[in-house]
Image (cartoon, grey):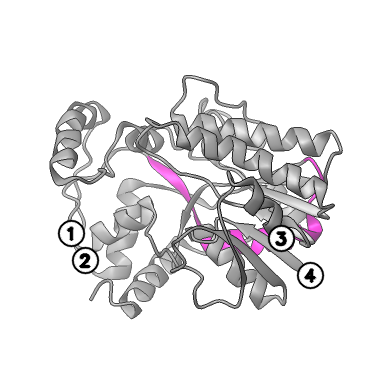
Amino acid sequence: MLVGVTGASGHLGNVVCRTLIDRGFQVRVLHRKDIRSFEDLNVERVVGDVLDLEAVDKFVQGCDYVIHSAAIISIHGDPTGIVFKTNTEGPKNIAEACIKHKVKRLIHVSSTHAVMELPFETPFDETRPYKQKGSFAYDFSKSTGEQLMLKYFREGKIDGFVVRPSSVIGPFDYRPSEIGKALLDFYNRKIPVLPPGGYNFIDVRDISATIVNALEKGKCGEIYLLSGEYYSMKNFANVVHETSGKKVPKMVMPFWFLKMLLPFVKLYGKMKKANPVFTIEAITALKLGHPNMVNEKAKKELGHVCRPLKETIADFYKWNKERKVIQ
């Protein structure tokens, strides 16, 4: 069986490829210039991106299954419009090509950011209402892209379903991701204080295993929440300390104070010619991180399992030490 994977240069995408190969699938990837995350893998490569119709057609043709994980993740808004374009037109292009070439099944990787976090009083499950225009750029783009894909599935145009991971964390984070950068900053003692709130974290290998399980087990038109366990940022920092031995900050600053610092952080980023990881999107995500994301549906139907965060963070640091990113 040939499985096409978009987003293979990203954290989740490359680990999905590794899991597929381990289970005996042939893999084809759609990629641009950055091949670091899969250059050691035996995969067929198609150069291009999800907005390139010719490349998408070449990529999809002959695939039995397609896993669409490509997206632009942003905590810096969408000043050029590329985030919304990629995260909405990309799914459309992939779906249309899959229909044309009679792909057996299409899995769309969405995000918990596509739906409303509040209220906290009720469990966060697959029935949460979608975010609307006026939400943060990335959140609205994922909401729109997911709904577009579900329309194809529920109208019977192609067999497929949606998976919604929470915050993805773990080894094989080559770029690295925003959470990967934060883990490295914790290790290098570059984080002076902690933000309030927290989020639900899930090991990238556990998500990938569930997605590959879903090739056979998922039901058409359904949504599956692939969550792990919630940690406040204070507890998260404690796990970092336990696994790395590094000192971590103890002080938690209030949201209003961090918000007040944002203009100065933005100015500092401009001076350094680098995007800061500390933005209104980032701190709001932690402030609104739901403490009760339930994954019973994915456990029951897809065999979703979650390893302890301590193991995930330990493996992240071990992997980075092997690559000599940290000492």
Label 3 to label 2: alpha-carbon separation: 35 Å
For label 2, the residue is 246
Mark 2 to mark 1: distance in Å? 8 Å
The residue closer to the viewer here, 213 or 274, is: 274
Percent x, y of residue 117: 51, 30
Q: Is residue 97 above or below residue 12?
A: above
Q: Amino acid at mark 2?
A: Lys
Quadrant location of the N terminus?
Answer: bottom right
Which mark is nearer the camera, 2 or 4?
A: 4
Of discs 1 and 4, which sits in the foreground? 4
Which residue is disc 1 drawn over? 189
Residue type pointed to by label 3? Gly
Q: Is residue 2 magenta?
A: no
Say which of 36 and 206 sits in front.
Answer: 36
For the residue carrying disc 2, how many other residues have a C-alpha within 10 Å: few (<14), some (14-19), or many (20+)?
Answer: some
**What amino acid type is highlighted by mark number 1?**
Arg
Cα distance between the residues tagged 2 and 4: 45 Å
Tell me which residue sits at (33%, 47%) in the image.
Answer: 233
Q: Which residues are magenta?
A: 198-221
Residue at 73 percent across and 43 percent down: it is 95
What residue is disc 3 on? 303
Q: Are marks 2 and 1 in contact (CB under 8 Å)?
A: yes
Mark 3 or mark 4, which is nearer the start of the sequence?
A: 4
Closer to viewer: mark 4 or mark 3 = 4
Instruction: Give the residue at mark 4.
Output: 1
Horizontal side, residue 31 vs residue 157: left or right: left
Q: Is residue 158 left or right of residue 298?
A: right
